[in-house]
Image (cartoon, coloured by chain):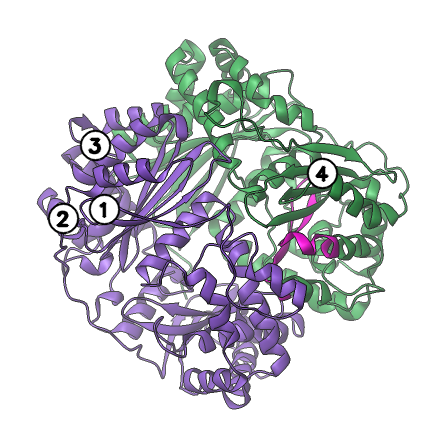
Amino acid sequence: MSLTVNWPRLLPMALPALLFSASVAAETPPPDNPIANFVLGNGMEVVVIPDRRAPIVTHMVWYKAGSADEPPGKSGIAHFFEHLMFKGTENHAAGEFSRAVAEIGGSDNAFTGNDFTAYHQTVTPEALETMMAFEADRMRNLILTDAVIGPERDVIIEERGSRIENSPEALLGEEIDATLYQNHPYRIPVIGWMHEIEKLNRTDAIAFYDRYYAPNNAILIVAGDVEAAAVRGLAERTYGLVPRGPDLPPRIRPAEPEHNTRRTVSLADPRVTVPSFSKSWLAPSYTTASPGEAEALDLLSEILGGGVRSRIYQSLVVRAGIAASAGAHFDGSKLDQGSFTVYGAPRGTAELDAIEAAVDAEIDRIIDQGVTEKELESSKNRFLRSMIFASDNQASMANLYGAALATGGTVEQVRRWPEKIRAVTAGQVRDAAKKYLGVDHSVTGYLLPSSTGRE
Amino acid sequence: MHLAAKKISEASVMTRTSAARLAVALGLALVALPADAKVQIQEVQTESGITAWLVEDYAVPMVTIRFAFEGGSTQDPSGKEGLTQLMTGLFDEGAGTLDSGEFQVRLDDAGAEMRFGAGRDTIYGTMRMLADNKDEAFELLRLAVQEPRFDPGPVERIRAQMVSGVVAALKDPEAEAQIKWAQAIYGEHPYARRDEGTQASLAGITAADLHALHQAVFAREKLHVAVVGAIDADTARHEIERLFGSLSEKPRLRPVQHVDWKLDQQLRVNYPLPQTTLQLAFPGVPRDDPEFYAAYLMNQILGGGTLSSRLFDEVRERRGLAYSVNSSLVTHEFASGLVIGTSTRSDRAGEALNVILDVVRRMAEAGPTQAELAAAKKYVIGSYALSNLDSSRAIAATLVSLQVEGLPIDYIDRRAGLIDAVSLQDVRSAAARLLSAEPAIMIVGPVAKQENGG
């Protein structure tokens, strides 16, 4: 299984939405199968997103347990446990589930993020109930022995080697997160620190399983060629039979103190020839923001550095011609605080300092003068149309709803995202820049060439 | 990754009453199925003779078009490597009377997304647009296809970005290894060259080179088009003719020779990395070879994408030697092969290599079991629709790939039968043919200190 550690961003914005919002509605009538949302008797939330174009179903179970929910000193257990979910249960031998998926040409996988762990299969509609039965079975019936734990820990160690240790960019990224978040567990990498991964054991795995893997801590998302009523019946026959687990306390993690310093993290590596920088700030997420603020940050990142028409790209890459790449990015898909990042790399003989200064100048210009109505409108339209494009892919829709619900959002919030985006004013975008992008509490990362190191 | 794992683009559109569905119901692979009323491919022919495949679908108010011209980076003149890639970076940088900025603003206002790219054998373009604004979107695409400007400013900028990419990879051992690998496998063939060019080759490219390449490749004869979405056949026919009808009929392509991979050699890139990467190359089969489906099934069992291949079981599940290990068939237009790759802890790289070679030898000598073949058939038949039909973009890409490979419009209906007809003996024969050769092996990592059979 090619398991993913970090949450892949699917769209330029954090939350998805319904397709046919007023201003972008086309000649087509709205879908006759609206999204359904209900809760089973044992507390498992269900979202059904019908898309009847092809006989394909995406089935996902999201657990509200990610790396930020790990006990201190056990970094990597959420992700390690995700791997262990592919081992045997009381009812099925190891590999049986994946073979059942493969036999019908389906695909299955899983991923772990800061705030969630998700398991998913793409299959034909006939196979949906079988998938649900397997998934419900491994929610509680996994058999974890030292014989399966040992080799899988070796796999995780190699995974860390492939993803992180082999990559200067990834190593620097870990250190930037560990510096940006001073107290909150988002400072710890999802895959875990090597010295802690090496010590993870069966007791840790079972404790994590027993605490978090229960229907009342899970969300079922089914997207594709299905009807909500039928999915409800199938869910009740499978997941509905799993007993409710103990009530979990609210997900309250250690909070960030006030940030009052400007911090710098550098990594020099002989594999690097073109230097680059990034600058990050803490910013509210869609869950923690006051009304409209996360939407304003999304639009700010789009206007500042969201693509080839953005200010940073036009100024540094096109007009001044000093950067090979440059842009901005807002991560608002978090249960707790998110982050805002700008980045750039020089082209030709330009100095990295000049790139950083020019990016800073673009931020200052928005703080001083705000954004124009035209660029605000264009950015909003880009977001709104990206939702139509997203609705072309059932897996994208499933992912967007799953991520929103696992980070404290609701179906209704997702539905209303387009109108929230439309309501953002130029003043709110400027205020967001002013409030969150002060250089005196930023973390700058430098990836630099180094002359030494080759054997 | 220069040579790694180009997935077979053997593709189709699937129907609601699909091979996968029946295969599930009956527990075995089945043959031709009726096309479904909802997802039907229509053939559309324009007045200038362009044939396109269309899937009408009004569920989402958008239209996707994808097209490909045969002739990719192999068309770069010697010494001007990177020309094709540079050209594909410039189609949204000014066309007709619009300069770069004007073009991009109009494209953005139209709500359309346009992308061009190139592989070794084709140049492709794709656009997705809102159904409401498709007239303006098609007009901008027409300008890009017919009248790209290649203005000095954008040319210099995109060239500089490509040079930055080349420079950034100069000291990267993985990039160095892939360059070395391509040269060792392909020798003097154009496939050995770097699609992205070199600092020297990029520096020598002029606007005249770009216009000449555009003129030579953008022609109707080797053009393949697919349209998917909220558009009817007459409108699609009209738009396709407007997009491409005025191009010249025949392209002027440089001839490219077929080439066999040079195997039976060992390459090493020594670098103090925490992991060692192994890459092995064996012979392959061309897409139109009678044994293609047998080889395809054999590769699936050996190390294809599922979580139950022989390599996955032996290297990862049993021994925990690697996070990922896989094999893939490579089918370029002028070369084919089978590649196996993994990354493993350096002190056990020797063990991992031995395990891989042992799995290969056993497959070459005895082939798969009947049960493995049956499972692989089910997977290969069922997965086709699930991974080729899950969005308009995927459908459009699939339909263009089918056309590039010269497959018929009813291939979808016939594909399950072609796979089902492969016998165990066929797969054994394909295994022996591909896997008995001495492979090319590349090892990238620290100098071996204690490699052993562990």
According to the picture, the residue beneath numbered tag 2 turns out to be B205
Name the residue beneath numbered marker 3: B94
Secondary structure under tag 4 reads helix
What amino acid type is highlighted by mark number 1?
Leu
Identify by letter the chain in purple: B
Amino acid residing under circle 2: Ile
The hue of chain A in the figure is: green
In this view, the mark in front (1 or 3): 3
What range of the chain is rendered magenta? A103-131
Dot 2 and dot 4 within a common chain = no
Residue under disc 2 on the same chain as residue under disc 3: yes
Q: Callout 3: 10 Å neighbours few (<14), some, many (20+)?
A: many
* Picture layout, residue B277 above or below residue B358: above
Judge from the rendering whether residue B128 lies leftward or rightward of residue B58; answer left or right: left
Q: Nearer the viewer, residue B345 or B265?
A: B265
Numbered disc 3: what chain?
A: B
Estimate the x, y position of residue A430 in percent, counting from the top left.
Answer: 48, 13
Sequence-first disc among 1 and 3 = 1
Q: Position of residue A36 (x, y in %)?
A: 71, 33
**Circle 2/circle 1 CB separation < 8 Å:** yes
Separation of marks 1 and 4 at Cα, in angstroms = 49 Å
